[in-house]
Amino acid sequence: MKLSNLRIGCDKFPESTALSSEVFIDANIFLYHIMRRPKFFPPCHEFFTAIESGAYNGFTSTLVLNEVLHKLILAEATNTYGLRSEHDAASILKLDPAKIRGLSQVWKAYSDIKEYPIIICSCDEAVLDMAIDLSNKYGLLISDATHLAVIKSEGISNIATNDTDFQRLNEIDVYKP
C-alpha cells in the first residue's frame, strides 16, 4: 500500500525548496496523515504523494518511528477498548500487556511506512552525543535535538514538522503543514 493512501498531509514546500531535496519527516507529519487529522491531512497527503513521485527524498529516524508507534498504540487502544483517554490506555496496557496483542492497525501502519520510499536513519551513540551538544546549544528537548543530530549527520537541510521549536534554528528550513 502506498503511504499516501494511508493519509499523511502537508502543504507544498516553499518554492525555494529544490526538487529532489532531502527532507527529514518528523513524527507529527506521519501522525496527521495516518490519523487523518482534518486540518493537516490534505497538505501532508500532498507531501507524501510528492515523495512517492520523487519530488523529494524522504528521511526519518528510528526515534521518530518509535514516537509514531507509541502514539498509534495509545490511540488504537483507546478506540479498541472504549477508553476515555490515551492516558487511560497507557495505564490499562501496563496493567494488562496482553491487550497489546489485540491491536492491529498500528502494526499495519508500521509495515506500510517500512515499504514507503523513505530512508530510515538509526540513532547511534555518535548521534546521541551530537544531540546532547545541540540540546545545550539551542535549548531543545532531547528528542528534538536527536532529530536535528540525525538531520546534520545526514547532510539534510529541510524538515517537515509542525514543531515550532525548529523554526528558531537558522541552519534548517522548516516546512509546516
Image (cartoon, grey):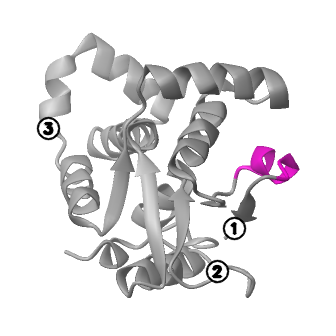
Left or right: where 45 falls relative to 95? right
Point out the tag, 2 or 1, that comes first from the N-terminus: 2
**Residue 137, image x, y percentages:** 82, 26
Q: Which mark is nearer the camera, 2 or 3? A: 2
Left or right: where 32 falls relative to 70? right
Are dots 3 and 1 in contact, CB under 8 Å?
no
Q: Is residue 42 above or below residue 78?
A: below
Q: Could you say whether the residue bearing mark 1 is in a helix, strand or loop?
A: strand
Point out the tag, 3 or 1, that comes first from the N-terminus: 3
Q: Is residue 60 above or below residue 36?
A: above
* The N terminus: image quadrant: bottom left
Q: Which residue is mark 2?
A: 11
Per the model, the C-alpha gap separating discs 2 and 3 is 35 Å
**Residue 148, image x, y percentages:** 63, 41
Please give the name of the residue rendered at 64% of the width and 57% of the height, measured from the top-left corner.
161
Mark 1, other Cα within 10 Å: few <14 / some 14–19 / many ≥20: many
**Residue 2, image x, y percentages:** 26, 77
- Which amino acid does the dot numbered 2 rest on? Asp
Per the model, the C-alpha gap separating discs 2 and 1 is 8 Å
The part of the image, by quadrant, that contains residue 18 is bottom right
Q: Which residue is mark 1?
A: 175
- Magenta segment boundaries in residue numbering: 163-170
Q: Which residue is mark 3?
A: 102
